[in-house]
Image (spheres, grey):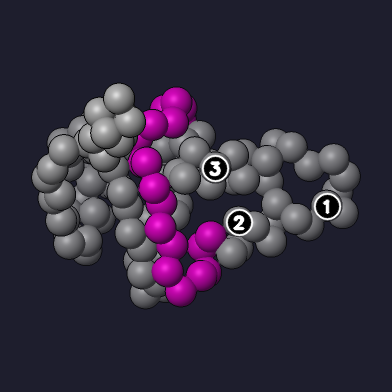
Amino acid sequence: TAANIFQQFERGKFGRESAFDEVPDRDINRYLNCDLLIMDDLGTEMTTSFVQATVYRIVNERLMNHRKTILSTNLTIVDIGTRYGAAVRSRIEGAYEVMRFFGKDIRILKKKQNK
């Protein structure tokens, strides 16, 4: 999920147990350089300036390096701009294909079936 990705970036920035701990850097580089990154549930995390900067970094670096990214969110493009800033919104609007999915909530349907 997006929240898990942000936790890894935060751990890399603030949570090193020693100067020789390379695991956070390895994970961050994996998120920035993998062929396809899927960020699920973007917008469910607590928005902080660190999260805003991290979203910008991920979106911008992956675009600059021609890496594919899928963002799954319930946010509108306006909500994304409000939450993460105009620069993130601009990059998403300019370089991403927005695909809207409509339908009934699968969790609610499953709950009704189990009654």
Q: Residue furthest front?
A: 115
Q: Residue at x 36, y 41 (%)?
A: 42
Image quarter of the C terminus? top left
Dot in front, 1 or 3 = 3
Q: Amino acid at mark 2?
A: Ile
Q: Can you identify the residue that label 1 sits on?
A: 21
Q: Can you identify the residue that label 3 sits on?
A: 4
Residue 11 in the image: above or below residue 100: above
Q: Quadrant of residue 37?
A: bottom left
Q: Residue at x 22, y 61 (%)?
A: 96
45 inside magenta stretch: yes
Residue 65 in the image: above or below residue 3: below
Answer yes or no: is residue 105 visible.
Answer: yes
Image position, residue 2 (x, y; %): 45, 44
What residue range appears in magenta? 31-49
51 inside magenta stretch: no
Image position, residue 110 (x, y; %): 30, 36
Residue 95 in the image: above or below residue 113: below
